[in-house]
Amino acid sequence: MPHGRLILNRVLSGWETNYMRRLACLLAFAACVACSAAPSNSSPKSVREVPVHFFNRDVRLAGTLVLPAAPGPHAAVVLLHGSGPQKRDLFMARWFAEQGIAALAYDKRGVGESAGDFNQVPFMFLADDGLAAISFLHTRTDIDRHKIGVWGLSQGGWLGPLAAARSSDVAFVISVSGPGVSPGDQMIFYYANELRSRGLSEGDVQEASRLRHEVWWCLHSGEGIDQAKADLDRSRNAPWYNQVKDQQDSLFERLQTPADWEKARSSLWFQKEMVYDPVPILQSVAVPALFMFGAEDRLVPVKDSVDAIKGVSAADKEGFTIVVFPHADHTLHLVTAEGRGALSPEYLQQMHEWLARHRLLPK
């Protein structure tokens, strides 16, 4: 998404298919864990669940609208996915409905009951699926069309602000572990932490990260290819190279011939997604926004993300709220001496209080 996503699996020829699939799987796992925080096969008695479908152009998307038991019209939230093949998140949808806010959770395009294929579009395009869900909610008399917002985890934390920047129909944004940096910078941060977990020295980690940045930028821009090839060839003898070679994308091992470099350059990841800059989008968001992070996140650079959001907020965004939870990971589960613990109770409590302050909860 790593990041509930982030990088998309592309239907490409040759090694590119496997490379992008590996990157997608890295981010998909975290989002899957978050969505399985509680059983999703039974609905609380205090909410009602309605199967729904809606369209973004010619793509039919299927989901569940979870409604509070009380009569409407209700404020509402659309749940945006992390990266990878994500189904509807009924755990979070039910939590929102229990607070008095209707929630629309849907299967990502190409997953579950939804048509289409998320692998065939840049991840930024998926914000329009969320806006199509909001348009659907506008057709319902039990929804207050002026109080519809978005919630997103990981990659969904990029998509929420993007949806708000694209449409005035978005009344609020809640971003959970949404990076304030580009996907390229986020993934380099992730790979560096993975190398640290394998015991590499900080010097080796930094050297490997510089090489990855050089090669990735070359594949994006087409600049400095000869130098990047030479630096990569020299690095094959470095003591850290085998560790980098074994990382999940296996990119360096796959760049053996000029044809390999050209194939890599043609992928949407290197051409568009890697360099997506969330800061101009944040500058365009004119609605209240809540950004939440876990201090122990090893997938997203929290400090850099918070600094980026604060930089925008300091300028003219009084409606931005940033919360960093100590001892919490990417999905805001507690990190304990025994390992990964329960979902942080502060996370849900802070979100409830923020919704109340912005008069989104029923009186």
Image (cartoon, rainbow, N blue to C red):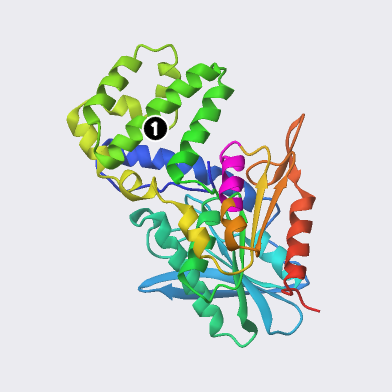
Identify the image quadrant of residue 19: top left
Q: Quadrant of the C terminus?
A: bottom right
* Magenta stretch prevailing secondary structure: helix
Q: Position of residue 41 (x, y in %)?
A: 67, 60
Is 6 on the left-hand or right-hand side of 104? left
- Residue that appears at 79% across and 57% down: 349
Q: Which residue is mark 1?
A: 213
Q: How many marks?
A: 1
Q: Position of residue 108 (x, y in %)?
A: 48, 60
In this rendering, does residue 287 appear at all?
yes
Judging from the image, what secondary structure is the residue with disc 1 in? helix
Query: As displayed, is residue 79 above or below residue 207?
Result: below
Query: As displayed, is residue 183 above or below residue 120?
Result: above
In this rendering, does residue 246 appear at all?
no
Task: Check if residue 309 falls in the magenta segment.
Answer: yes
Identify the image quadrant of residue 23: top left
Task: Check if residue 46 falls in the magenta segment.
Answer: no
